[in-house]
Structure formats: structure tokens, C-alpha cells
Image (spheres, rainbow, N blue to C red):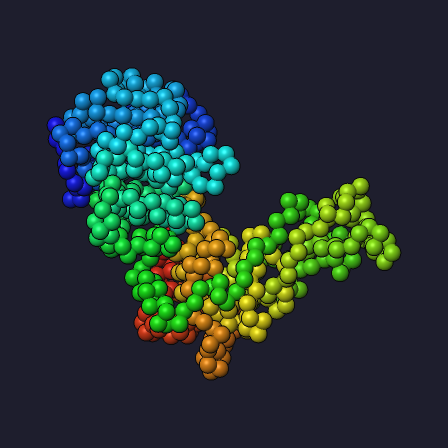
Amino acid sequence: MASASSPHTENPAPGLGSRDVSGERLEREVPAEVRHARGQYFTPDRLVDFVLELAGGGKSSDPIVLDPACGSGRFLLAARERWELPTLALRGFETDPRALGLAREHLPGAHLFASDFREARPAGDVDLLVGNPPYVRDRGAKRDLYVDFLEVAGGHLREGGRLALVLSNAWLDVGYGRLVRQLLRDQFAVEWIVESSVERWFEGAKVNTMVLVARRCASSAERDSQPVRFGLLKAPLPSSPQVVREISQRELSVEQPWGPLLRAPNLFLDVHGMAGARGLVQLGDLVRLRRGFTTNDNSFFYPPSGAEIEQEYLWPLLKSPKRVGGVHGRADDLKERVFLCPRSREGLQRLGHTGALAWLDRHRAGQPQSSWTLPSREPARLFLVKGYADRFRQPLFDRPVHGDQQLYSVYPNDSGLDETLLAALFNSSWFHLSLEMAGRVNFGDGVLWLSVADAREQILVPDVRALAPQVAARLRQAFLELPKSRVPTAGRVSLDPDWGPAVRRLDEVVGSLLGLSKREGAALQREWAARCDQRLAMSSK
């Protein structure tokens, strides 16, 4: 048998094979929508080979290999071939009878169990726990199934045993990923965290994936000193990961997302590393964010322009960021209105407001006042967009308007804070690069989504409350000089004859507040555009 005792990094991708006819049969026989509802995405041979090579073998002559969601047995078959293992050394769990039947057909003698791995009693003797756990959530759960798999994986591994798993990359960035990061810090020495920057490994999956390799380790000193390699695949498999960053495990914060360590340019991390010395604050220190209206009945709450309703019940509405092409918004230019009526039918009758009454009679006949009352929202002048493709703009309006649920209303914590200064920060390349790092790219469709918590806690900005008057004036003027025209896409901003120079002037001011040189400030727009291009390129793979 050929085995390895430590992770191999020289050539982690041997030639492809067509070993898994069972997996191909299963993909043909089970409708795609059924497999996807179960979170089943069969791992291509080239990715199986990459994961096994990256993980290496066990110390024993015949390592015990376990797949917690083995499906048709693709990883186990590959492990048997690679290390010439007896089938008795292979273990797998699978709850899908059809998949398990195919695995048993191709791996006679292996220990394959028709049960849920999460409920299995751990033996603590496994050398390598490998596989591609399902990505879906249990009904009502707030986290993906693979998190549950990781919670119990350590109990199955012997000391020094490894896990090598293909996972959704969500845990690197989202809130519940803190649990995963804490678990890894407490039980494992993390060896590899790898993503591809050029291809998606699963057709039809609405998630982006990564590979995690970690060693079971009881020694806190050994865990702390473990060098964690963050690697990117910059060519399709078979290929080797390029180490973009290597840091000791003690330096990894469970409170902070790890995704930027894979994706962020050095300039971004340098600024974050000196945040205190440079006077940067969390965005949440300056503003409150609140998502716009989710009406569940837009045809009622967003009446058509011809609706004969009294104007006091109709407020200007920013339905979508597309309604304002640039960053300078005018409330009177908005076509849509939101119906906000705090009065009862009796109150409307007393006032003779027949338009609102007719609207209620048509759409809410016989229903209580609660049926036409939306949750209280204060209108706002400044908005932060929730989702991004390649066009970034955070509009500032001439007077307060309401927003739909695709936007966050921005309210300064200090009522005296000039919102124009905030708008300048929000439309700088530094802020847009920060959005790329703080947002979530784990849905596979190329759209960057931003949560309130991510924006509030992960985005660092200069403290505009403490600016000298002349500096504040420069920042304000830089925003006001941004063109009134439609914002170009990220890759076209620098080439636009109007937007290019204006953004460079704004970035120079913001860059100086970040403690950057002119050259570094000018690099912010390039770094942001490059990250945006990479994100969107992955969505088309």
C-alpha cells in the first residue's frame, strides 16, 4: 500500500479517473431537483483527487477512512485506489437507500451504515474523515447541515487524524461561522483553507465551495503554532493551490471572518491591522441601518401613479437602486409611492378623505386597521444598497424618502453629523472594497449580499465626526463633484472621462484619512474592481 503520513503539497492533483460509475448512475436516475433538495452534489473525480492528495494518508499502514455522507462511495473508492486499502478499512454513512445500495455494490466488505452520521457513536480511531457533506439546512435550523457534521467529526478521529472536507464557504464569512471557527481553534490544527478563483466545482449548486484540511490536535500550544495556509486555485483542476497567506493559528480571531484572508489584497489587511492607530471606527459607531419595507403586498402598499389617494398618505419611495442611476437623488424624481395611512376608517370618514377610503374598500374591505399598517419607519436621505452585481452606488437624496427591502436606510447616530460626509465615504473605492470583503459571496450567483450586522461590524471607516473643518470641506466637496450621470460598472469607472477623475479625487481624500499615500489611495479603485471582476467571473463558470 502507498500511504502518506502528512499533507502533500507539491502536486495536489493527479490525473483524472472515471472510477465512479455508480455516482454517474445515481445522477442519471435521480432527478436533479430531488438531489438538490437533499443537498446532494456529486463530487467530480478531479476534486476528489485534489482533496485526497491535499489531505495525505494516515500514519498506520492501513488507515481507516470514513466518509460521513458517502453517497455512492466516490471518496471511498478513490481512497481505496490511491492507497490500495482493504475495503475493511473503509467506513461510510448514508441515509439515501439508493445511493447506499450503489456504494455497497462497488465496495463489498466496507462498513457502510444506513444511518445519520450525526447520531453515530464515535470510535475515535479514524485516520481520515473525508467527503462532501450536504449543504442544505434541517427544517427550521439557522445553519447548514455540514456545521452539525463538523461538530461531531472530532470524536471520530484519533489524535493526529485528519478531516478533509468540501464545504460551503459560508462559514468563512457568516455569523454562524463563528461556531465553526471556534470549533477548529479548540480541537484542530488547521492546515489548509482552499478556494478556487477560476471555477465552480458543482454545476447547479447555488453555493460557492472550499476545501478544509485540519488535524485533530489536543495540544493547545501545537494548535496555536500551526501555520494555516490560505490557498487559491488560479487554474482549473488538476492544479496546485497558491498560498496567498500563511499565518499562525493563534492569530486567527474567531470573532472576525476568515474569508478576507483568502480574498483581500494586502493593502486592505494593512489598513485593518492599523485601524486603531489610524483612527478608524466600525460603521456602526457612526450610523444605524434599517432595512426598508417588506410589504408582502406591493400592489396595495405601492399604489400605481394614477391612484386617487390623498397626497398625505403617499410618500416618495426608492423601490430599487436602479431608480436612481447615480449618487445624487431627488425625491421628486421618484415615480413610486408607498401608502402609509395611520388612520382608521372612521378617522378617514371624519376628515372626508374619500380617496384613501376607496383604496381601502377596494383592497381591504372588512379587514382591520392592522391590515393596512406597515411597521414604523423613518424616512432617510442616505441609503446603502443590499445586493451588488458590478454597479455600486449609495444615493444621497435632497430630502428624506422611504426605501424598499432591497435597501438599508442610513441614520446618523449623531443628529448633527453631515450626511454628505457619510455619502462621500459610502461612495469611495475604500468603502466598495470593504463591501466586497464584508459581504457574502456564498450563493453562487455572483451577487454580493450585505447584512446589517456585516456592514455595522465589519466595515471600518474614518471617523468623520473628528475631522478638522477644512478636511471635512474637502471631503464634502469631493462628493458633490461626483457626476450626476449613471454610475459606471466597477471595471469602467476609471475609464469614464467624468467619473474616473472625480472618483480619483474622492479616493485621494479618503485615502489620506486612512493613512495611505497617494499611490496607495489610487490603488484602491483597481483592487476593488479586480475583486468585483473575480466574483462575477466565478458566477459564470
- Residue at horizontal 71%, vertical 55%? 340
Mark count:
0
Query: Would residue 336 be found to the left or right of residue 227 on screen?
Result: right
- Give percent across and percent down for residue 184: 31, 45
- Residue at horizontal 35%, vertical 52%? 254
Quadrant in which the C terminus is drawn: top left
Q: Is residue 256 above or below residue 137?
A: below
Query: Would residue 186 be found to the left or right of residue 417 on screen?
Result: left
Quadrant in which the N terminus is drawn: top left
- Give percent across and percent down for residue 377: 64, 58
Q: Quadrant of residue 492?
A: bottom left
| Front-most of residues 409 and 236 | 409
- Give percent across and percent down for residue 6: 16, 40
| Front-most of residues 299 and 292 | 292
- Residue at horizontal 55%, vertical 67%? 412
- Residue at horizontal 15%, vertical 31%? 60
Q: Quadrant of residue 411?
A: bottom right
Q: Is residue 198 above or below residue 78?
A: below
Q: Is residue 131 visible?
A: yes
- Give percent across and percent down for residue 356: 79, 52
Query: Would residue 191 be found to the left or right of residue 520 on screen?
Result: left
Q: Is residue 50 visible?
A: no
Q: Is residue 169 above or below residue 317?
A: above
User: Which residue ends up furthest to the bottom in the rendered image?
Assistant: 470
